[in-house]
């Protein structure tokens, strides 16, 4: 059975690169009817936090990346790592190293000064020296000293690394905590992981991990190392490129299916398809279609894609998502049918739920125009037009067509162009200069509220 895993370290939020790794691993398992496992690599005690763990869980839940097993926590598996380390020691495939930090620092300085690659020199590998008293050793793996590690990366192709390039890796630190490479190996072995899909910053770890698996007589997973994601400027992705938490995009009002669609296209493709459902992604996904070159993160394309999904989303679903945004902005929503009408009117003009909420506020409470808008439109000529309109509006049956007709008649009565009536009316009622058609806006806001807002603002006009 195909078994993949996502194994983030909870030392920060779930970022773009991690989310894409999770997506590819999840999609590959779902494509083949396999299992997707979530592991939390929490052995970095200083930096791992509960908040970071929750951010990972929340991010995956928002994206819909459900896991079949887990989450498993490495700090709850310490006894197992010790058991495997003891097995390697008994078989003379590992040894205790008593070299101090000061010794190793000096060794690295000497190697750098000599123009050599800094590496452990194996001083405790086969020594007969008596261990120093009171020193807690680390446990190191006896890496083969000759030969090569050869593996077929499912993205990068054949990779060959000489064992002479690898030193004796620390398996357990002196405090008994496993190193990254050892914890990963034991976890992948115990969880029967068949395919390891991860970022290509782990390529250098793979030969070490393969050697340990061979020493344990364990099956070797297939590896697929996915190229990194760069910013539009070609630099490593960072916060200045928009590489923030996945939860940030949720909180900004992006739709998860749009985000999934965008993530999938960061380094993977199915022909020229740009827009596809999650079900289509599962159907089409194949590791051989992952590009070997780095992908570039483009926030504008993500927003364009989100706008596409927002336009086609059911208004009732958008209503569920927008309510928290409106509540934060002190909006009182009178009823669901009213909210649905507002959404239907505005959703094609915005790119995110957050933008939609911002554009909808004036439907639920009056907004005060900016000082600049008041300077432009609050004058005696406009006041005369509005007073005329109040009388006209008061006597009509309230509909979009009748509102439009009265605005048109008012423009004719004052011998001015239609915008000379519509623009100040828009500013007075909505507090904004840019909105959909004013007759559609006023129809929704209603006659009573429209007249109330006009009367309230007229009192602010200069004499």
Image (tube, helix red, strand yellow):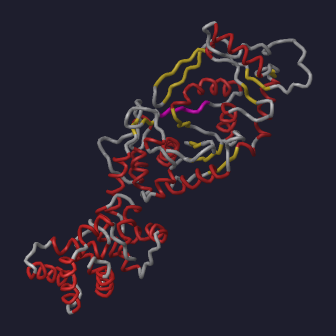
Q: Is residue 86 above or below residue 309?
A: above
Q: Is residue 32 visible?
A: no
Locate residue 358, reporting x and y percent: 38, 65
Residue at the extreme bottom: 395
In terms of depth relative to the viewer, which is nearer, 13 or 240? 240
Find the magenta span and give its range: 220-226
Which residue sits at x=23%, y=71%? Answer: 377
Residue 1, image quadrant: top right
User: Left or right: where does residue 253 sit relative to residue 127?
Assistant: left
Q: Is residue 373 above or below residue 366?
A: above
Locate residue 107, reporting x and y percent: 72, 13
Asked if residue 222 lies in the magenta stretch, the reply is yes
Asked if residue 341 lies in the magenta stretch, the reply is no
Report the quarter where the C terminus lies.
bottom left
Residue 110, image quadrant: top right
User: Left or right: where does residue 395 sit relative to residue 169?
Assistant: left
Q: Is residue 119 above or below residue 275?
A: above
Residue at the extreme top: 114
Which residue sits at x=36%, y=55%? Answer: 306
Most common SS among magenta residues: strand
Q: Is residue 87 visible?
A: yes
Residue at the extreme front: 463
Residue 142, image quadrant: top right
Locate residue 150, reporting x and y percent: 55, 20
């Amino acid at each position: 059975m195909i078994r993949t895993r996502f194994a983030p370290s909870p030392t920060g939020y779930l970022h773009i690169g991690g989310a894409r790794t999770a997506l590819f691993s999840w999609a590959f398992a779902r494509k083949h009817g396999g299992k997707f496992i979530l592991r939390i690599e929490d052995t970095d005690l200083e930096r791992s936090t509960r908040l970071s763990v929750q951010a990972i869980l929340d991010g995956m839940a928002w994206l819909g990346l459900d896991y079949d097993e887990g989450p498993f926590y490495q700090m709850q598996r310490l006894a197992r790592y010790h058991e495997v380390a003891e097995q390697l020691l008994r078989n003379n495939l590992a040894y205790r190293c008593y070299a101090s930090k000061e010794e190793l620092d000096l060794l690295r300085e000497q190697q750098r000064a000599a123009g050599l690659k800094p590496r452990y020199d194996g001083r405790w590998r086969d020594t007969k020296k008596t261990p120093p008293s009171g020193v807690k050793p680390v446990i190191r793996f006896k890496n083969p000293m000759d030969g090569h590690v050869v593996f077929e990366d499912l993205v990068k192709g054949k990779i060959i690394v000489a064992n002479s390039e690898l030193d004796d890796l620390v398996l357990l630190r002196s405090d008994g905590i496993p190193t990254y490479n050892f914890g990963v190996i034991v976890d992948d072995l115990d969880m029967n992981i068949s395919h390891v899909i991860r970022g290509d910053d782990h390529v250098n770890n793979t030969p070490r991990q393969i050697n340990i698996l061979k020493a344990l007589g364990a099956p070797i997973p297939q590896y697929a190392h996915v190229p990194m994601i760069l910013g539009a400027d070609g630099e490593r992705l960072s916060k200045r490129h928009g590489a923030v938490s996945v939860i940030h995009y949720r909180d900004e009002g992006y739709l998860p299916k749009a985000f999934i669609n965008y993530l999938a296209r960061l380094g993977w493709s199915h022909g020229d398809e740009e827009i596809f459902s999650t079900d289509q992604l599962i159907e089409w996904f194949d590791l051989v279609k992952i590009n070997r070159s780095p992908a570039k993160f483009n926030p504008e394309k993500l927003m364009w894609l989100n706008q596409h999904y927002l336009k086609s989303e059911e208004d009732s679903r958008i209503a569920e998502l927008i309510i928290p945004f409106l509540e934060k902005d002190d909006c009182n929503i009178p009823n669901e049918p009213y909210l649905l009408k507002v959404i239907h009117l505005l959703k094609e003009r915005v790119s995110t739920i957050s933008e939609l909420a911002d554009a909808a506020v004036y439907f639920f409470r009056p907004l005060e125009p900016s000082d600049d808008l008041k300077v432009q439109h609050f004058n005696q000529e406009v006041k005369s037009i509005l007073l005329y309109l109040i009388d006209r509006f008061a006597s009509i049956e309230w509909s979009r067509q009748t509102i439009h007709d009265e605005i048109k008649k008012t423009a004719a009565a004052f011998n001015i162009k239609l915008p000379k009536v519509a623009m100040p009316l828009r500013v007075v009622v909505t507090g904004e200069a840019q909105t959909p058609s004013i007759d559609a806006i006023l129809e929704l806001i209603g006659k009573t509220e429209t007249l109330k807002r006009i009367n309230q603002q007229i009192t602010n006009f200069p004499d």
